[in-house]
Amino acid sequence: MELLSLQFVLLLLASLAAYYSIGRTKPEAQWYVLLAASLAFYVLAGSWQTLLLLILTSADIWAGGLYLAHLDDQSKAERKATKDRKARKAIKERYDKRRWRAFWTSLVVPLLILGFFKYLNVILFNFGAAESPHSLGILLPLGISFYTFQSIGYLIDAYNAKYAPEQNYLRFLLFVSWFPQIIQGPIGRYDQLSGQLFAPRHADSYGMRRGLLRLGYGLFKKLTIANVLSHNVSQIFGNVTPGIPGSVVLYGVLVYSIQMYADFSGGIDIVEGVSELFGVEMAQNFRQPYFSVSLADFWRRWHMSLGSWMRDYIFYPIALTKPMQSFGKWAKKRLGTHAGRTLPACVANILVFLLVGIWHGADWHYVGWGLYNGIIVAVSDLLSPVFESLRTRLRVTDETRWFRAFAIVRTFCVVNVGRYFDCVSSLSDSFTCLRATLFNFAPVPFKTALALCKVDGAMLFGISRIALVACTVVAIISWHYERGTDVRERILSWNPLVRCCLYAVLAALMLYAFDFTANGGGGFLYANF
Amino acid sequence: MPTSDATPRKPLWRKLLGVVSILVVLIALDVALTLALEPYGTCTDAIMHEYWEDTANGEQFDTLVIGTSVGQYSLNPHCMDNGLLDNAFCISTPIQSFKSSRMVLDTVLKDHPIRRVIVGTTFFSFASDVWPNSNMALTQSLCLGLPFPENAYRYAQLALDKNFVSGVKSLAFFVPFTLNHVDYSPSAVRSNIQRRIECATPMEAEELYDPTSIQLGNGFTSYAGAVNFETINENNLIFERLKYQDSNENNGEMEEFASLCALCQEKGIELIVFMSPKPVVETIGMGDLYPKTMKPIQDIVTSCGGTYLDFNLIKPDVYEPLPEEFWDEGHLNDVGAKRFSPVFAEVVSRIENNEDLSGLFYSYDQWDDYLSSIDTIAYVHFTPKPIEGGFLCEGEAFTGSNCQVEYAYERQEDDGSWTRVKDWSTDPNCTLLDNGYRTANVRIMARQVGAIDPELYRYQTVTFLGN
């Protein structure tokens, strides 16, 4: 079952009907409906076998969390029973070691499963033990990266005793398998989601209309932009040759950038909208990323749930390790306060982005992509005093509208250089494209170059008019969001006739563009990760 | 989540009225868009309209021809001396899935005493899209003549078809015109509406919609025109083999086909399944995969007591399709149908007379004999692979196992003349170098060793992207 299918719509309607019907008579049992819907979705969209993996991962993490809490309780009880300070310290140390071992024992199961399905074939290929990166025919189970990270986050929180672990396995299973998030995130946190998933609810028509509006907006982005542009991107980057004109590469990167945003944020809007229909607000995953003023800002606005996951569970643990602290002190002595403060963060940033790259896929070009982003963020952090003094000398304040516009354009450019590592299928293609952009930009007129790359140059810039219209609509809506307007609330307050006209126009655009989806399929780019 | 409680609650009847009004407007819009955009006068439309009209007039058929368009294109009932199809109706439609064929048979059986079913198909039917768009058009046309409960039942069946309902195309369930529509241009929409207004029947409209169609009555249609194999779109030809190899594991069609055959057996209906003649390259291009794939299909038919005929393996002295007898890469044209139909009728007569057919066809076990019987070059083409500064063109000729082939390459100059870039040789490959950014027309030629003139040409366009 695809997310964009009648079957999903039927499942959603049946789940909503059951959820709110049960809510009238037995509200405390409502969450069972969500669990049943989630498991049904996982079986229909994946298979029984992949459901077993999900159950295995969640059972391991759930048991691990409980055991960690149990050890913590035991440690506290034993320490309470002992008066001697030294003995209390020894008990704590003993239990800390046991908790550390228990933590890693629990962690290793999902990591091994993820490693087997996502990385084993590529690793073997790189060591010459497999014919190709896909020769073993290992298929990536649906949503494995997302639910593994979500589970690991829970385990780390349980280890840090951030909250009491969930006692009921089925409730924990619902947290891991909550169906709107399973295909492409967002990566949820237990303390944010659990309260909402298990709370009794009644149908709230305003909330549901907001949810529907979001769902529709996501569908609009997916059908009229992402699916329309995907053909152009695959034509250009499907077969990169050494002589490919740089103008076409740059055009392809820009189109890819738009396609990726529309596909991913559209998909997220759809699933967030679906979740809101049940009254569950999942973590925000996008906040107008193309209005970012720096690369670091961009990563606080794009795939926010992964970014915050990395920050909390990788970045801080690395940056706060003893060796990093010592490194900071060493740097402070030799290179000054700023370097002492930022260098450990820089190293942690590079490692985090490297990991994010590898999370996206077991390919060298993703490693390149991760390193590029990590190094840019690290270097800009390191050089921030230089930029600051440059701005002072040029008498530019970063609050002015013009500087903000400049920063947005600059960030967009920096982000798109990173896309060179993302939109191709190999690292060598990334370098070929970069070389073409720098040294072979326009060997022939742009229209000819497009035609040579089999992109229909007869359309405006090779882009279908429908995508241009849709991009304009999305840009206007994003601009309003960026200004702090609650666009959904504003639209819902409009006169019904005006609203109907708006819906009719957007629906007509989606129907018009449906050919691209029917012929190209309705899958989501991030479902592959 | 922000909530708004500023507005007073509306009474239930007003809410219901609102919902009903919205639904009415949506349905009206849907109907209007369908009338404007859904093509009026497609072959499926025409066939089903004729069928429902004939049925309403009390006409009876005892033979039903179903399957994909290859069956529809290849049979001309007027060219059969023995009157094999005089009392037949043809509901073969483009990319008809076997599930749809079964649905057609179910429907027809309710009104007609069918004693023989002829299924015209091709190996491609077992490897095509899991849910082709044409299924929607057929279901709609089929439902047009059904009373309401059955009509709703058919649509429900469609909605529950697992291949349909789980895919993105199912979003078009309530707006089916998005799967099957005229060009989104004012002129195409205008012509469509004009056809609806001016043409009394979809059959009349079909003649305007597809001027190459020749209606033969009772659902049979031929198509005028011939394809040029020297310039055809290869995506529709050789790459079928690759598509098949990718998807032959299971797209569910084999099971559906078995179920169709079992239904015929259960109802005591004589079943004839025939593989319609395709260009020879389609058969030999599949290599050993062809007998390996077709044998299980034959087994299904024979195990259900049916007759299986593969006209691609008929002996050349009995029948051999000519390249100019094809309307496109896979369908016979009107001339081809006229020549094939008597052969088909003759073979069926022999079956009825319990004659032995083994002398007429090669069996799948005789695949090597079939290959050695081909003494012409069926097709030639090349695949350009990028190399530093140009392309390595890898030529390939499709012919019998005993033929020795020579190749030559020529490139077209700006003035239209052709320059030889590689002279005749048994080496099929050729290197084309060009540091510029341009497209170039290149042709490969093939002949049997010892011949003087080229036997076949194939024209392809190559795009050079600098170094």
Image (cartoon, coloured by chain):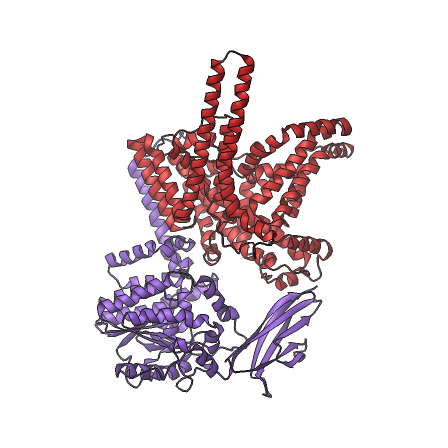
Chain colours: A red, B purple
Question: What x and y, as percent, mark residue A124?
Answer: 57, 51
Asked if residue A81 is positioned above or below residue B35 in the image, the reply reads above
Number of on-image labels: 0
Would you say residue A283 is visible in this rendering?
no
Q: Which residue shows up at 59% across the image and 80% down it?
A: B445
**For the view shown, which residue lies furthest in the top direction?**
A83
Is the residue A18 above or below the residue A427 in the image? above
**Vertical relation: B426 (above or below) B144:** below
Q: Is residue B467 left or right of residue B273?
A: right
Residue B84, picture quadrant: bottom left
In this image, B13 relative to A158: left or right?
A: left
> Residue B331: which quarter of the image?
bottom left
Q: How far from the left and from the top, in percent, is residue B370?
A: 44, 80
Percent across and percent down for residue B68 are 37, 70
* Residue under the point 54% across and 57% down: A231
Which residue occupies the foreground of this view, B340 or A130? A130
- Image-based side of B371 in relation to B157, left or right: right
On the question of residue A49 being in view, the answer is yes
Image spot of residue B63 (x, y percent): 26, 75
Q: Quadrant of residue B423?
A: bottom right
Question: On the rendered structure, is A440 left or right of B274?
Answer: right
Q: Nearer the viewer, residue B364 or B67?
A: B364
Relative depth, front residue between B442 and B77? B442
| Front residue of this view, candidates B372 and B173 | B372
